[in-house]
Image (cartoon, rainbow, N blue to C red):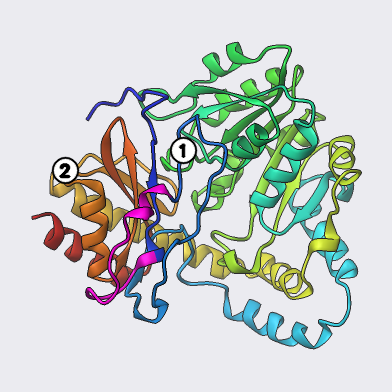
Amino acid sequence: MNKSINRRNWIKSSLLGIGALTVGPAIAFNKKAELLHTYHPESTLKEYIPTYNYDETRIVARLSANENPYGPSPKVVQAITEAVSTGNRYGHQDAAALIKMIAEKEGVTPDHIMLGPGSSDLLEKTAFVSFGNGGNIVSADPAYMSIISTARSLGATWKPVPLTKDYAHDLDSMAEAVDAETKLVYVCNPNNPTGSITDPERLKLFCSSVSEKTPVFVDEAYLEFLDKPDTHTMVGLVAEGKDVIVARTFSKIHGMAGLRIGYIVAQPDRIKSITNKVRSTMGMCVTSLKGAIVSMQDQKFLEDCRKMNTECRDFVASEITALGYDIIPSVTSFLIFPIEMEGQAFMKAMYEEGVGIRVFNIDDKPWCRVSMGTMQEMEYFVDTFKKVTV
């Protein structure tokens, strides 16, 4: 496999996996799916919505959206259920309690924390306040596109830097790309959609140095799937006074994707620069806040999810590698690898067997990205993959 990633050809289109997922041919595959999620630099809008109907009750294995199949935890479900009766009240006190808990966990004071309905919301809010007057954003290519897409829609330019041959951020080239017009540097680590990670010591030196020139936003949505996440986080730089913004989410390992809650850790002045222009906790739901408070305390659930995710990831990697496919080593809740079958035909065949995945076009070659489900779901994925590709 060619590990030199070309910027313009890296991801021309991503095909929405689960949106059309059905068992059997009852719903015809819609060719418009190829237009659903476009990543190439010419795009300004990144949509992740189906353009056709589907019967979700017929889904067998939903492996397209990097969701946690085990969550939220039973304790969170109970807390949310009990919180429904307080839904007539605003959740400001719960937000303050959660902020205090997060601040203690991250080793900063509460004024370093901002909550939002998912980390993507906070990425976009940061873009809104950073790129109102243009400028440019520097990031790896490929990367999670939320903040980049928003910045470009506001008139900013994107300065993409291809990943290295081992799929790490090319930190030296990214530092060289920073100029007087750079309003923000974005680092997704672990990276999506590759699942790869960049050396933490080198990244700390990069963030420390570059943040003297412009803010560095480090998206750590998948960090907690690592065995030792504390050794890879950049949040310590915030405590040191660096102009670094670190994002976390409850959507992944906490299993709360549909409940929409996340946070950023940054310098108080940086937090104020955002909250002075957009609303913060007013957009938070009391049920999600109660659930997040309990989820942070349920460490056993998080540890169990991490262990089961690793077991499933290792199983799939072993099975697919044994078939001769070259998988990018992942530390996240998903795997990505090139396939030998035409992308649209592959996705259609997987859907018809009840398996939702994502298909990307990388260097004019189709790649499959599969999220980790339960072990039963991953066994079904492997069996279906063999059936479809043989």
Q: Label 2: state its secondary structure.
A: loop
Choose top left, top right, bottom left or bottom right for residue 262: bottom right
Is residue 262 shown to the viewer in this render? yes
Residue 222 inside the magenta-drawn segment: no
* Residue for point 25% across, 26% down: 2
* Residue for point 19% across, 59% down: 385
- Which residue is tagged 2? 340
* Residue for point 55% across, 31% down: 200
In the picture, the quarter occupied by the C terminus is bottom left
Percent position (x, y) of residue 40? 45, 33
Choose top left, top right, bottom left or bottom right for residue 388: bottom left
Percent position (x, y) of residue 266? 79, 39
Magenta span: predominant SS is loop
Which residue of the protein is positioned furthest toward the left in this rendering?
A: 390
- Which residue is tagged 1? 39
Q: Earlier in the sequence, mark 2 or mark 1?
A: 1
Nearest the camera: 7 or 217? 7
Task: Magenta stretch: give its range.
Answer: 20-35
The residue carrying pointer 1 sits among few (fewer than 14), some (14 to 19) or many (20 or more) residues within 10 Å by Cα, namely many
Residue 27 inside the magenta-drawn segment: yes
Tally of marks: 2
Q: Label 1: state its secondary structure.
A: loop
Percent position (x, y) of residue 278? 85, 48
Amino acid at the residue labelled 2: Glu
Amino acid at the residue labelled 1: Tyr
Nearest the camera: 177 or 382? 177
